[in-house]
């Protein structure tokens, strides 16, 4: 569906947990394709598809792949509490 996130390496992500998982093994090159000075596709997807504006802001602030993954996992853990 149009809700899926298609990663530059061909993977299709259905939800935020799959995004956190994909970040684990994503190459820096692929990450930079989606998140750079001009745009952040991950942040846009979280905001536009899941309407999670605060998580989208956390992702936007992250400076690299690891920080992005940590921001997502931290937010998911908070939601469980």
Image: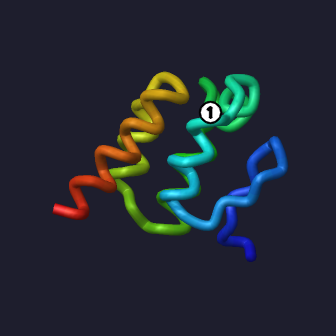
Residue 65 is situated, as x and y percent measured from the top left of the image, at 54, 29
Expressed as whole percent of the image width and height from the top left, the position of residue 70 reads 38, 36
| Left or right, 49 with reference to 72 | right
Q: Quadrant of residue 60?
A: top left
SS assignment at label 1: loop
Query: Is 65 above or below relative to 18?
Result: above
Q: Residue at x 68, y 37 (%)?
A: 34
Q: Dot 1, how many residues are within 10 Å of its Cα: few (below 14), some (14-19), or many (20+)?
A: many
Label tally: 1
Question: Label 1: which residue?
Answer: 35
Spot occupied by residue 39 in the image (x, y as percentages of width and height):
62, 36
Q: Residue furthest bottom?
A: 1
Q: Nearer the viewer, residue 2 or 16?
A: 16
Task: Depth check: give the residue in front, 2 or 14.
Answer: 14
Instruction: Give the residue at x 30% y 44%.
Output: 74
Q: Is residue 65 left or right of residue 76?
A: right
Quarter the N terminus occupies: bottom right
Is 47 displayed left or right of 12 in the figure?
A: left
């Amino acid at each position: 569906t149009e809700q899926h996130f298609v990663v530059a390496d061909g993977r299709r992500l259905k939800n935020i947990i799959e995004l956190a998982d994909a970040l684990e093994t994503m190459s820096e090159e692929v990450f930079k394709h989606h998140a750079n000075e001009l745009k952040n596709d991950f942040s846009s997807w979280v905001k536009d598809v899941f309407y999670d504006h605060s998580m989208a802001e956390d992702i936007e602030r992250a400076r690299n792949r690891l920080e992005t993954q940590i921001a997502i996992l931290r937010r998911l853990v908070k939601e469980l509490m």
